[in-house]
Amino acid sequence: MSKSLQSTLRPDVEDAGTQFIPFNRFCPIGTEFAYVQQAIDQLHVSGDGPFTRKCHRILEELLGVPKVLLTTSCTHALEMAALLLEIQPGDEVIVPSFTFVSTVNAFVLRGARPVFADIRPDTLNLNEALLEQLISPKTKTIIPVHYAGVSCQMEAITGISERHGLTVIEDNAHGLIGRYRGRPLGTFGAMSTLSFHETKNFACGEGGALVINDPRYIDRAEIIREKGTNRSRFFRGQIDKYTWVDVGSSYLPSDILAAILYAQLEARDEVQAARSRIWEYYDVHLKPWASGQGVGLPIVPEGCEHPFHMYYLLMPTLESRQALIAHLKTRNILSVFHYLPLHLSEMGRRFGGRPGDCPVTESVSDRLVRLPFYNSLAEPEQARIIEALRSFQP
Ligand SMILES: *Cc1c(COP(=O)(O)O)cnc(C)c1O
């Protein structure tokens, strides 16, 4: 490990007693500036330059898929998926209510009607047992989200989708490097999407990727990403001029962002080692306390290898959750809740969402609290967080 990498992943914590502990912090590897400099020196700062190609190669090898295309965000990768599936007004998409707004909004933008599914109480993932009853003749796609990078029950979900002729798109914003029964997350659906937003394991500020498993989508994905033109084929020398051939937009990031992302992806083993240490430290030290307090901790079922994306607590009630967040705040520690149920949002209600539609989502959303989690979170800081939790009187 390089000196600079070591120092960003394991900083000296001089003031562990009182220093503010944020919930999230961008953690540079140390090689970002050199790569950005290189991108500038190469005089290729628009999209699909040398660093974008390096990122594509790393991700294609890591996942074992025929095509990965960097995008400006996971949201945009989801929008591309909706365009590629030719989602039409009135089509239905099945999504968990317990997810980020983009999982569903990308499809609503094309006129789809979201059908909200409740989650499993153990992994907080789409409950596959409820899927069949939500399918109608208008259903086009199912969008599982691997919450915290812990896999959904993918055999059951792909089995149901095949029986009904539906396409599966995995929102894998949390799950890069995660596996289910040995197979990488993001390789079960026809396509999947990744996020490189600041809050994710690997970050370039804002960024994402569309992962294509079904090769039938590759050609059109390249066109949609390049303003509806066949410019990608032109750059490969496959045609002698490029032109407008389809609908599309501009979904490719600058090579400067790809340079930052490349620095992060290249250091993936060190990043994951740091994150697994942080996750295990929380888990080992919180288990005895949690069981005595009626507090739930993340459940990782057999066969799921998760990428240590987050650590959360499930408090007994909304009141105890709010009190805990306030208590940690008095200790200068920032913890956050996660995902208000989409079916109860202003937009979700316009699609007919009502209280009681997704009872597990509603209960979990009231009680979940995420603890600080970033690559450079050091052990003395974590010890302080655990000490603060132990001193909490609900
Ligand atoms: C972060 C996130 C997104 C959005 O990612 P962006 O890159 O910010 O667009 C989508 N879905 C899930 C589940 C996320 O956590």
Image: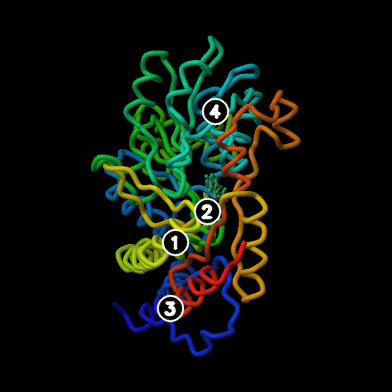
Q: Given the image, on which type of amino acid does mark 3 rest?
A: Thr
Residue under numbered circle 2: 207
Note whether 117 is above or below 15 in the view shown. above
Q: Given the image, on which type of amino acid does mark 1 rest?
A: Leu
Q: Is mark 4 within 8 Å of ligand 1?
A: no
Which disc is residue 167 wearing? none
CB-based contact (under 8 Å), mark 2 and mark 1: yes
Q: Given the image, on which type of amino acid does mark 4 rest?
A: Ala
Which disc is residue 8 wearing? 3
Note whether 333 is above or below 290 in the view shown. below
Instruction: Tell me how far mark 1 sits from mark 4, CA to CA.
Output: 33 Å
Q: Residues within 10 Å of mark 4 (few under 14, many from 20)?
A: many
Q: Residues within 10 Å of mark 1 (few under 14, many from 20)?
A: many
Residue under numbered circle 4: 117
Mark 4 or mark 3: whose residue is earlier in sequence: 3
- 169 left or right, relative to 66: right
Q: Position of residue 376 (x, y in %)?
A: 45, 74
Q: Between tags 1 and 3, which lies in front?
A: 3
Mark 2 or mark 1: whose residue is earlier in sequence: 2
